Image (cartoon, grey):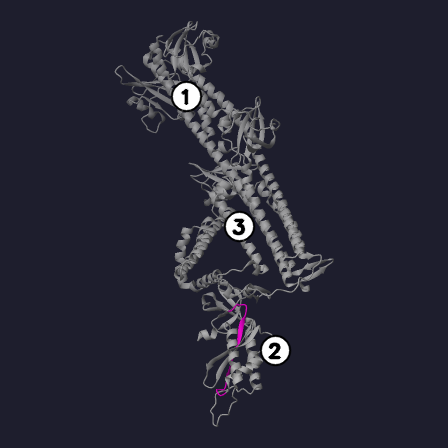
């Protein structure tokens, strides 16, 4: 390589590296900017929703606390009611223990005005009720109302209780002691900051945490070990903690993109790990960069290879055109321009493809996250409703048991006034007393003359169980048969002195809070207000009748989804693709619940909208870089001759020129060379072969990279990458970008495995005998075709084809083929095998039967061959058999000529030795020879000898004619008779005999010619 070429190569490498750097920085910046914008929009939406969620959590906390306190205030009041209504009240420890069990509380005490404990159920840690801490309890003596809760905690004694008091008389009060752990657990589960933030997710692995605005301690974080730690010590810069700020932060060594919202005295920070953004971004950028690198590598290396060949053989003026002070290399310029154009288009396609894949996968992941959040919301609401229903049943059963306890011990209290007083104490709406016949005997409600129904479908029938020995009945909340309002009824049996059922007490409650919660669980309440990005929404389809159970457009509510654009295939769990509703297209993800198909849908987001601009920017950068490379390759300031061309190598002997149907002359490998197990050395290859090798290496690298990425995708990219999403299969089967990508990935894996196995078989065949090598080659061929068939089958399944049905159809199709389309299918399959096996190529010279010509086209059904007269023979692929591929570096032309038996063979051989070199000078088509092959046969009338020459296959036929002419002229010149069939009627002539010297010369000539032409012109002998 000359110094000038080395300098140009160095410049090209520098330009390529700089181009890659520019492209990498540009792509990374653009992709990062898009990702940040997307996450910023999501964080703003979450911040907007967070204020509402925190307010609801605070309201839930207040409501839970009020409800909890009211329950225990009612329990204290019920003891005071029993003390004042002759229900067997005694200020004794035993009676307090009985009340404690009845009311299901930790402790019941009677305390006098001075704070002295008169009676108690259990000996809890002693309390000084006379201290100011318990002044709130003594307010019962002033206003007669149950006291507010008083909480006391002594950690050193492992004691923590909440107290409630109710007035018995002017000197005593009843005090309920209860551990508030249940209350605070309920608050932690439903009303704490953690309960709100733990259900918020940003993107794949993003989350929200809280930092105190007073001391910067972390109040909540998904990692419990960080809760309570100092956020500033963890790496957060205090200047970043500004309301509405979006910035990068570092916490506990992890880099996060954060959005800050300050609510009250706390900072709520939505955070997305940097790894979430880099996972998908790096794949997109990496693929585009690799394609760009491959295009530049192919163009640059091809130019260098051609220039190197020019130096070796010497420059040709015809290859250059002057352009001002520069010289344009037409050979490099034309092909470099084509490669640059194809490469540029490839970069555009791959860029658009990867941008689409990146956008859709990001949108799919976001939609799936959102639909999973909705599912979580529904599950939490349903769980809360079930929990609250159970609490209502349990707590109000306790109230009903208290009412039954009171009525059973003092039946005189079963009057309207006393029952109303009891209802007020128990904080319920109504109390009903039924006798043993199921007839209402007393109530504080407006109902009178009521008797339990005998109809099992009626609401009251269920309570007949209480008259048959059942201790209690807790009915589910439902609409009241009479009023239509939501109500819940609970009954507890009454017993006579002998223990027999003697009626029951029933309470009626209006579960307003439960009613509101149950209403919030309805699908329309959950989905209303769900926001997805800037214009996305959620909707639901009822599984029972495929109607819209909820849709933002009220006009579609109750309408059949299939009648408005959706299809049956879209009504299922895990759907992730485009849907059309009323002619509007959305990208949606679905989730199946017990009653609905839930969808999160949106129009093409910002990422999709930016595909074209991003692709054009990428293409612009690529085009500028490719133009610079093209100019460096195709133009020179000056050139000089590099010297004489070198002699051809063995590899050059294996390469021949063939004329294509388009008229171009290209180099191809000879037919025999294609099947020998020996590759070209690098220096033996032409520029085209070298660039093909480079392209194969790049393709192999890409296939291997995909294989490694698929096998080790979790370790390399993490679960949030494009690879993870595509391999998860959480997308709709069909002809879409995810299916196509999955097919490519599977093909790469299959090809890698098949190639490795074939390489191992090739190595194994080298150490085995002939039989072993035969088996290895057979197994390798089976693996090749098995891999192709397997890839085709699996890829068809990925794009939504029912392969089971396809196989069944194939059986039916084979029957149809056997009757009508057998020949057509046979032709197609034969054509595929011709291409796969590489028996011949376009431009090869072949012989099929007795037809010899150049292959001009290998079609799906037929092969077209052109003979020397420009006639085209169309042969069905299934009829292409016994092919002789005559594509080789050189062929031979032969001439068989007869001499008289009486003629001296030695004399003829001496004449040939003198004259054959002159024949070569007269026939320029001869590459080597002519050679004398000796006597080929002893005919009836002549001794037949053969003359052969080496030539191009395309010159063979004409050269044979020319040889025949030369031999006739030669024999005429030396009076050598060429016999023909005749009847001899006279004495044969006397022929001239060879001298001893001529005989020795003839023997020497014969031996030399046999050695010189031992590999030439032997085919016909082999046929014999």
Q: Verify whether residue 899 appears in magenta.
A: yes
Instruction: Indicate which label's residue lies in the foreground, 3 or 2.
Output: 2
Q: Give the residue at mark 1.
A: 509
Seen in the picture, residue 103 relative to 834 is either above or below; the reply is above
Question: What residue span does the magenta drawing correspond to?
Answer: 886-902
Residue 344 position, x and y percent, is: 61, 52
Q: Give the residue at mark 3.
A: 701
Seen in the picture, residue 917 relative to 706 is either above or below; the reply is below
Quarter of the picture containing the C terminus is bottom left
- The answer to whether residue 421 is visible is no
Query: Residue 318 falls in which quadrant of the image?
Result: bottom right
In depth, the one of 167 and 551 nearer the eye is 167
- The answer to whether residue 390 is visible is yes
Residue 739 position, x and y percent, is: 49, 48
Mark toward the start of the polypeptide (1 vs 2): 1
Mark toward the start of the polypeptide (1 vs 3): 1
Q: Give the residue at mark 2.
A: 922
Give the distance between the C-alpha atoms of the residues marked 1 and 2, in whole angstroms. 124 Å
Give the distance between the C-alpha atoms of the residues marked 3 and 2, in whole angstroms. 54 Å
In depth, the one of 39 and 504 nearer the eye is 39
Q: Verify whether residue 843 appears in magenta.
A: no
Seen in the picture, residue 866 relative to 603 is either above or below; the reply is below
**Of helix, strand and loop, which one carries label 2?**
helix
Instruction: Indicate which label's residue lies in the foreground, 1 or 3.
Output: 3
């Amino acid at each position: 390589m000359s110094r000038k070429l080395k300098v140009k190569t160095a410049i090209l490498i520098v330009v390529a590296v700089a181009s890659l750097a520019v492209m990498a920085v540009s792509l990374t910046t653009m992709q990062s900017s898009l990702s940040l914008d997307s996450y910023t929009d999501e964080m703003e939406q979450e911040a907007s929703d967070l204020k509402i969620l925190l307010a609801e959590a605070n309201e839930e906390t207040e409501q839970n606390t009020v409800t909890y306190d009211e329950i225990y205030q009612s329990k204290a009041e019920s003891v005071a009611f029993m003390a004042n209504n002759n229900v067997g009240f005694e200020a004794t420890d035993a009676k307090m223990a009985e009340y404690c069990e009845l009311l299901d509380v930790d402790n019941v005490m009677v305390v006098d005005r001075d704070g002295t404990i008169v009676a108690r159920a259990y000996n809890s840690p002693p309390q000084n009720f006379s201290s100011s801490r318990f002044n709130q309890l003594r307010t019962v003596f002033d206003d007669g109302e149950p006291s507010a809760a008083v909480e006391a905690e002594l950690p050193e004694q492992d004691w923590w209780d909440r107290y409630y008091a109710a007035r018995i008389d002017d000197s005593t009060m009843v005090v309920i002691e209860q551990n508030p752990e249940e209350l605070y657990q309920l608050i932690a589960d439903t009303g704490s900051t953690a309960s709100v933030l733990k259900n918020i997710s940003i993107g794949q692995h993003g989350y929200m945490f809280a930092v105190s605005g007073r001391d910067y301690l972390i109040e909540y974080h998904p990692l419990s070990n960080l809760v309570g730690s100092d956020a500033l010590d963890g790496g957060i810069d205090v200047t970043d903690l500004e309301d509405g700020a979006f910035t990068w932060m570092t916490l506990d060594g992890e880099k996060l993109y954060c959005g800050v919202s300050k609510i009250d005295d706390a900072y709520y920070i939505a955070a997305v790990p940097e790894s979430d953004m880099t996972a998908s971004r790096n794949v997109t950028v990496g693929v585009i960069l690799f394609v760009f690198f491959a295009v530049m590598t192919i163009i640059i290396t091809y130019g260098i290879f051609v220039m190197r060949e020019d130096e070796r053989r010497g420059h040709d003026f015809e290859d250059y055109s002057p352009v001002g002070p520069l010289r344009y290399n037409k050979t490099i310029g034309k092909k470099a321009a084509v490669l640059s154009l194809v490469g540029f288009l490839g970069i555009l396609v791959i860029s658009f493809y990867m941008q689409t894949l990146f956008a859709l996968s990001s949108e799919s992941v976001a939609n799936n996250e959102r639909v999973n959040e909705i599912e979580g919301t529904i599950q939490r609401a349903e769980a809360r409703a079930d929990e609250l229903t159970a609490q209502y049943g349990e707590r109000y059963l306790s109230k009903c048991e208290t009412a039954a306890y009171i009525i059973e011990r003092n039946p005189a209290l079963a009057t309207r006034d006393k029952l109303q007083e009891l209802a007020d104490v128990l904080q319920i709406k109504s109390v009903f007393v039924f006798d043993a016949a199921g007839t209402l005997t007393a109530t504080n409600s407006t109902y009178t003359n009521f008797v339990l129904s005998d109809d099992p479908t009626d609401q009251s029938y269920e309570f007949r169980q209480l008259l048959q020995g059942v201790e209690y009945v807790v009915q589910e909340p439902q609409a009241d048969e009479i009023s239509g309002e939501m109500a819940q009824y609970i009954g507890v049996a009454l017993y006579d002195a002998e223990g027999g059922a003697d009626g029951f007490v029933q309470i009626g409650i209006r579960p307003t809070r439960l009613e509101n919660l149950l209403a919030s669980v309805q699908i329309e309440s959950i989905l209303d207000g769900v926001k997805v990005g800037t214009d996305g929404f959620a909707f639901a389809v009822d599984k029972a009748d495929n109607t819209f159970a909820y849709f933002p457009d009220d006009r579609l509510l109750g309408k059949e989804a299939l009648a408005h654009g959706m299809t049956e295939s879209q009504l299922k769990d895990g759907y992730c693709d485009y849907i059309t509703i009323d002619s509007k297209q959305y990208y949606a993800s679905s989730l199946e619940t017990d009653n609905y198909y839930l969808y999160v849908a949106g129009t093409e987001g910002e990422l999709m909208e930016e595909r074209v601009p991003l692709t054009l920017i990428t293409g612009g950068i690529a085009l500028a870089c490719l133009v610079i490379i093209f100019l460096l390759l195709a133009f020179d300031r000056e050139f000089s001759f590099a010297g004489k061309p070198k002699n051809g190598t063995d590899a050059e002997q294996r390469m021949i020129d063939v004329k294509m149907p388009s008229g171009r002359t290209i180099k191809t490998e000879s037919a025999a060379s294609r099947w020998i197990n020996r590759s070209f050395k690098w220096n033996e290859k032409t520029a085209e072969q070298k660039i093909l090798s480079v392209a194969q290496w790049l393709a192999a690298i890409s296939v291997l990279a995909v294989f490694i990425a698929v096998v080790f995708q979790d370790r390399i990219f993490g679960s949030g990458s494009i690879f993870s999403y595509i391999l998860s299969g959480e997308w709709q089967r069909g002809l879409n970008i995810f299916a196509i990508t999955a097919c490519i990935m599977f093909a790469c894996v299959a090809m890698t495995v098949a190639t490795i196995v074939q390489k191992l078989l090739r190595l194994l065949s080298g150490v085995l005998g002939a039989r072993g090598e035969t088996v290895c080659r057979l197994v390798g061929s089976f693996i090749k075709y098995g891999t192709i068939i397997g890839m085709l089958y699996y890829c068809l399944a990925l794009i939504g084809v029912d392969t089971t049905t396809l196989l069944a159809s194939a059986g039916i199709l084979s029957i149809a083929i056997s009757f009508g389309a057998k020949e057509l299918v046979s032709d197609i399959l034969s054509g595929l095998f011709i291409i796969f096996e590489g028996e011949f190529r376009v431009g090869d010279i072949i012989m099929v039967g007795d037809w010899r010509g150049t292959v001009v086209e290998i079609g799906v059904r037929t092969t077209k061959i052109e003979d020397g007269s420009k006639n085209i023979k169309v042969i069905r692929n299934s009829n292409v058999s016994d092919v002789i591929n005559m594509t080789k570096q050189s062929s031979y032309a032969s001439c068989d000529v007869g001499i008289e038996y009486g003629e001296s063979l030695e004399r003829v051989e001496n004449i040939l030795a003198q004259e054959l070199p002159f024949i070569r000078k007269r026939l320029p088509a001869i590459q080597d020879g002519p050679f004398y092959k000796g006597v080929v046969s002893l005919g009836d009338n002549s001794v037949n000898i053969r003359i052969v020459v080496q030539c191009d296959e395309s010159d063979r036929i004409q050269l044979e004619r020319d040889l025949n002419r030369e031999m006739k002229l030669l024999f005429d010149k030396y009076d050598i008779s060429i016999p023909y069939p005749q009847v001899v009627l006279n004495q044969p002539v006397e022929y001239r005999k060879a001298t001893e010297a001529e005989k020795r010369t003839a023997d020497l000539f014969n031996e030399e010619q046999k050695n010189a032409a031992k590999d030439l012109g032997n085919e016909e002998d082999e046929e014999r």
